Amino acid sequence: AQTVTQSQPEMSVQEAETVTLSCTYDTSESDYYLFWYKQPPSRQMILVIRQEAYKQQNATENRFSVNFQKAAKSFSLKISDSQLGDAAMYFCAYRSWYSGGGADGLTFGKGTHLIIQP
Amino acid sequence: GAGVSQSPRYKVAKRGQDVALRCDPISGHVSLFWYQQALGQGPEFLTYFQNEAQLDKSGLPSDRFFAERPEGSVSTLKIQRTQQEDSAVYLCASSLAPGGDLNEQFFGPGTRLTVL
């Protein structure tokens, strides 16, 4: 079974600064997807960024980028130019490449609460 | 629809009552997932449907939990004889296809269940 670990229960950053959220995972699979989801207080989970394990290039979406280290099983999220609207819980998640047989659901970490200081 | 919707948004039940939670996925989405999110935790997978077929129910915590999607669209998660440990937010998600690049899961707002 796969596990996802987020070792930072809470992080705080000044508005306009850069913050990095950590995520490590454990798997025996070679092909998989990794995701970062944002969950604001309204509780609707929103996909921030995704990475396919076969891609060596780190994914980027505007101010959000990842540092994917496959050998180290590490998948950190960098948020540049932090904005007040970035305040939320951030979850790292894993999904197997293969579908069926229990592989379809996401495995989440416990989350990191991101606080933006004005 | 514009997004995944869930109802009710909040449910309070007395211990021992049965509850039914509804999920309306995005129109045309083949895959539907249920997750349970306890307070201060990440969501945990409960069950998965591909159209009307329940392909994976490995995450259901007990036989008191039952899910269905009879026509391949709307899904209902039913919890019988609720217990206090069932208190959580129940999230529903749907995706266009089960695998490949179309497997992004879109989440609903969740139903917060409180069992007294």
Image: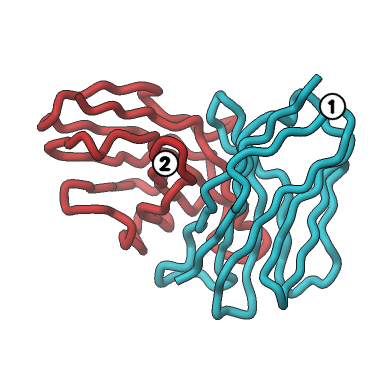
Chain colours: A cyan, B red
B6 displayed left or right of B18: right
Mark 1 lies on a secondary structure that is: loop
* Rendering coords of residue A98 (x, y %): 54, 73
User: Residue A83, located in which quarter of the rendered image?
Assistant: top right
* Rendering coords of residue A39 (x, y %): 60, 35
Q: Residues within 10 Å of mark 1 (few under 14, many from 20)?
A: some
Closer to the camera in the image, B53 or B64: B64
Q: Which residue is mark 2?
A: B37
Q: Which amino acid, by three-letter code, is at mark 1?
A: Glu
A56 displayed left or right of A22: right
* Rendering coords of residue B88 (x, y %): 35, 35
- On what subunit does the disc labeled 1 rest? A
Dot label at residue A118: none
From what the image shows, is residue A23 above or below residue B109?
below
Closer to the camera in the image, B20 or A58: A58
Q: Which residue is mark 1?
A: A15
Q: Classify the position of the N terminus of chain B by image quarter.
A: top right
- On what subunit does the disc labeled 2 rest? B
Q: Residues within 10 Å of mark 2 (few under 14, many from 20)?
A: some
- The answer to whether tags 1 and 2 share a subunit is no
Q: Which amino acid, by three-letter code, is at mark 2?
A: Gln
Who's the residue at 50% across and 64% down the image? A3
User: Residue B83, located in which quarter of the rendered image?
Assistant: top left
From what the image shows, is residue B102 above or below residue B115?
below
Q: Are the two marked residues, 1 and 2, in contact with CB atoms closer than 8 angstroms?
A: no
